[in-house]
Amino acid sequence: MTGAEAFKRKAYQMRFTDIFIRRPVLAFVVSALILLVGARSLLTLPVRQFPLLTNTVVTVTTTYPGATAELMQGFITTPLQQAIATADGIDYITSSSVQGASTIQAYIRLNFDPDAAVTEVMSKVQQVRYLMPPGANDPIINKSTGQTTAIMYIGFSSPSLELPAISDYLTRVVQPVLATVEGVASADVIGGQTFAMRVWLDPARMAARGISAAEVALAIRANNFQTAPGQQKGYFTVANISANTDLQSVDQFREMVVKAHEGALTRLKDIATISLDAQSFDAAVAMDGRAIR
């Protein structure tokens, strides 16, 4: 056996642990490194009953006041649903069409990027927006990630405030505060009633004066709109211009001129009953026999 062969045989017989025996400092460094990595893993290792899964639901809500459920299904729900179904990451879709409202829920595949899913759905909705009737409102797209079950219901009531006033207070004050709490995905007002100017037309009085509902709607739009007049600038001064072009009270709506014919003025109060009330009475919530919000 030559010297080279004996050296190779001796190197082959050398065990891995011999390196740490001959180099104690290296053994101490490796042990300390393993200890630090283990301590770090112990502090950051998540402990959960089930594996972490990301489930996302994208909801597309479209309203069309006055439209029947069949019209909503044929002209709004169907084209939107067909377009959304071609988006990437869609698992399955459910939809419902009722009087004046269409709701489409797109369930995204597990662990698919929620932001990418919303972007895909928004793109598909915009592609078929021109197919929707002109009177339909723009679709509202909401995203919910994780558990969608409400963990708390809070009821609000008042012996002095009307229900629309309570809803207005919740929307302006309470809801923004709850929505900013850490861990809260959304804070929704269930059964809320938004303030609106209610105009109850009298068909008999309208027929007697030869006025149609379309003329009333045109008069309201012509007398109640927002404008931005801008600024007036001089050499040394700049003045902001404000124009009151909208009606702001019940009395102003009542005195609004709907039609002028041969010197005779027909005002809105002559053919309708006007009141400041809830925009819709389709939904109501009660607790312990009392109406709440």
Image (cartoon, grey):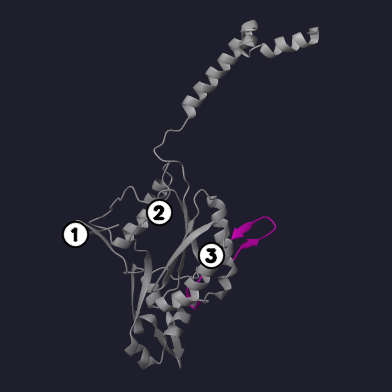
Q: Quadrant of the C terminus?
A: bottom left
Q: Nearer the viewer, residue 140 or 14?
A: 14
Tell me if residue 75 comes above or below residue 154 in the rendering: below
User: What residue is drawn where x is 38% and y is 91%?
Assistant: 209
Q: Amino acid at mark 1?
A: Gly
Where is residue 11 drawn, in percent x and y?
71, 12
Answer yes or no: is residue 288 visible: yes
Q: Quadrant of the N terminus?
A: top right
- Indicate which disc residue 289 carries: 1
Classify mark 1: residues with Cα within 10 Å, few (<14), some (14-19) or many (20+): few
Q: Quadrant of residue 16?
A: top right
Answer yes or no: is residue 136 visible: no
The residue stretch that appears in magenta: 222-240
Where is residue 249 drawn, in percent x and y?
39, 69
User: What residue is drawn where x is 29% and y is 64%?
Assistant: 284
Q: Nearer the viewer, residue 94 or 99?
A: 94
> Considering only order in the chain, which callout, 1 or 2, is on the residue closer to the N terminus?
2
Discs 2, 1 touching: Cβ within 8 Å: no
Label 3: state its secondary structure. Answer: helix
- Indicate which disc residue 172 carries: 2
Is residue 70 left or right of 240 when viewed as pictured? left
Give yes or no for residue 245 being in the magenta stretch: no
Is residue 82 left or right of 205 when viewed as pictured? right
Where is residue 117 drawn, in percent x and y?
55, 55
- Indicate which disc residue 155 carries: none
Classify mark 2: residues with Cα within 10 Å, few (<14), some (14-19) or many (20+): few
Query: Which residue in the protein does label 3 denote?
Result: 84
> Considering only order in the chain, which callout, 3 or 2, is on the residue closer to the N terminus?
3
